[in-house]
Amino acid sequence: MDLLIELFSEEIPARMQARAAEDLKKLVTDGLVEAGLTYAGAAAFATPRRLALTLEGLPAMSPDTREERKGPKVGAPDKAIEGFLRGAGLSRDQLEARETPKGAVWFATIERKGRPAAEIVAEVLEATVRNFPWPKSMRWGAGSLRWVRPLHSILCILSDEHGTEVVPLEIDGIRAGDTTRGHRFMAPGEIKVSSFEDYVAKLKAAKVVLDPVERAEAIRHDAAQKAFALGFEVVEDAGLLAEVAGLVEWPVVLLGDIADDFIELPPEVLQTSMKEHQKFFSVRNPGTGRIEKFVTVANRDTADHGVTILAGNQKVLAARLSDAKFFWENDLRTVARDGLEAWLDKLEHVTFHARLGSQKARMNRIARLAARIAPDAGAGAGDARKAAQVAKADLASEMVYEFPELQGVMGRYYAKSAGLSEAIADACRDHWKPLGQSDEVPTAPVAVTVALAEKLDTLTGFWVIDEKPTGSKDPYALRRAALGVIRILLDNGLRLKLDHLIDAQILEHHIARARRKGVDDGEIEALEATLDEIAHHGVFGAAFKAVLAAFHKADKAHAVAEGTYMARIGKTVPDLSDDLLAFIHDRLKVHLRDEGIRHDVIDACLNMPGNDDLTLLVTRARALQAVLETDDGANLIQGFKRANNILAQAEEADGVEYSYGPDVKFAEEETEKALFAALDAAEAKIGPAMISEDFAAAMGAMAELRGPIDAFFEAVQINTDNQVLRRNRLNLLARIRDICLRVADLTRIEG
């Protein structure tokens, strides 16, 4: 048998339709299977006024079932036995006592007769409708039923080669039947259906396209054809296409003109305004790059072929675009008169976060960090600093206030209008990127510099105030910021010492907090003096101690006493820095796992020096994975682990460390002498390769040790009675371990 369900209502919001169709499918199919009804296939559909579900291959009856349940022991308290009986739905005289290894136990045999499919479908569908997980729902009339919009009718039929049966079901006065309705305006009458195929065909005849994929494809195809015929192209927008397909049951594509008054607006402004306010698609002139036309989708055919609809839409669109033009022209006048400085002053009064200060203070921090990053990114420090200072100026513009999604995009236009360079203007647009896994990353040096500085300032700031992501909660999108840092560095092949930059920026935040708290100016000056040293020349501790010592010599010993602000910062910054770097490493693991690099390979490389240089780290990980995918590499790991295990056991038993250098003159076996020679050859290759960071060559040389190590273990007894030989061979194992560990921490490799 086949089942067809339709829940017909007032208009369902487009954003809810796809999820609702899947929920209907899951709830019904799960309920049927739990009740013993299997099925061969299922599909769900949604239009603005209906959810539909079709199931194929249902049996006419659920099967008879017989289930045995083990209960409490014979002699157990009455309450335990009564609880068991309630769960089984039996009486005491239906229990059977059986002997088990643990004594006599009550058993219940529960037999259930199969039931008609219609009876089960009715129960499952009623439970589904009454408990449907709408994000928002409403009640209407005097009933208790809740639905996203008033529910008008339920179609529920079972059909086979013998005919069609209406499932007997009534929910709050709505009785299930075998009828539906067509298009609200073009075919509002009742339609009687006998199967899913009949349902789809009659709906289409009644001007309703049931499948949202089919509606979306019809919109995409017709829009592209109409634009192409005039030499234009539709700007693709998958999200808008899915939304519009959920607004209409009978899509009719209409192509209209944008008035000349608005064509000179930036394309992004036109596109955003039309999408957000009117749900229009933008149509671009490929020769000029301007948005000159639009596509709207009507929900009906008209006698005048949409002329009246287009005229109304163009009138409303003109009003919307007049607002956008007003914002654009006002913003340009402000920039022409005052430059971007007027907006920067406004941002001094816009709070970024209550504990992290204003947007302007944030931009100044980002500018200082960008100047430090610039040389490593190939950008000029001056350009990077300037770009960072103005990158968020457009947040104070009227256009971005109206359309926040245009932040950055408008920043580029305004920076160009203010006479700033292309590189700075591009950085204003691109410093937000990447905003997601599939978003492109900036590649121009200035934009890369500012984007990195912006994300590192965000991460360090929230680490300082202890607002880290927890579980699934990440209100400040810090995981996205960390992934942005990773992708920018890797995609551009940048080599940065993240640890030093993180230290310096954490200190920047502490300096800002110190000023707000009124900390002694001398302490703040000393803190500021450390920043460039920390960012460029080494670990935080050494640079900070040097400044403390200098501060002490300047006869300000009171400022470095235990408990002062400076002393507290000296203790907290390294811990915060290590914790944030570990967080970035965790996001890197996820990113590399998506690329197919094993987690143990990543761990083996994370445990090596220089792990804050992500580009170097990933180069090492890719080289190690490539070696491990070869037979020599995989078998070498076994040889390394065998050597390491024997060595660890001997060192623990003897209470000494075998790392004093083996001597070939004590070698007796030919395989032993061959291993000495192989280790010499490998070391000669690995040393220079590691210095030049040619990890592929280093790991290839390491993999060549597989044969000599295997032969050594097959022919040589390590723990021989001759103590001179034993010590020499253990030292030889130590040399194997040391050479391999120079390449990666192979103790982290599994298997």
Image (cartoon, rainbow, N blue to C red):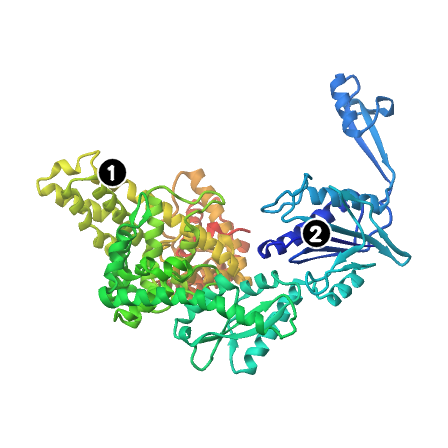
Whether pointer 2 and pointer 1 mark residues with C-beta atoms closer than 8 Å, the reply is no
Between 601 and 713, which is closer to the camera in this rendering? 601
Residue drawn 87% across and 57% down?
160
Kindly identify which numbered label has been placed on residue 255: none
SS at badge 1: helix
- Badge 2 density bin: few <14, some 14–19, many ≥20, Cα 10 Å: many
Residue drawn 31% across and 43% down?
355
Res 696 quadrant in image: bottom left
Please give left or right for residue 82 compared with residue 235 in the image: right
Q: Position of residue 180 (x, y in %)?
A: 76, 56
Between 366 and 419, which is closer to the camera in this rendering? 419
Between 465 and 409, which is closer to the camera in this rendering? 409
Looking at the picture, which amino acid does disc 2 mark?
Answer: Lys
Q: Position of residue 256 (x, y in %)?
A: 53, 74
Looking at the picture, which amino acid does disc 1 mark?
Answer: Arg
Image quarter in which the N terminus is found: bottom right
317 up-or-down from 117: above or below: below
Please give left or right for residue 541 compared with residue 253 in the image: left
- Badge 1 density bin: few <14, some 14–19, many ≥20, Cα 10 Å: few
Q: Position of residue 694 (x, y in %)?
A: 39, 66
Q: Is residue 695 visible?
A: yes
Kindly identify which numbered label has been placed on residue 568: 1
SS at badge 2: helix
Residue hosting label 2 = 25
Q: Position of residue 120 (x, y in %)?
A: 81, 44
Give the mark nearer the N terminus: 2 vs 1: 2
Marks 2/1: CA–CA distance: 59 Å
The residue most toward the left is 555
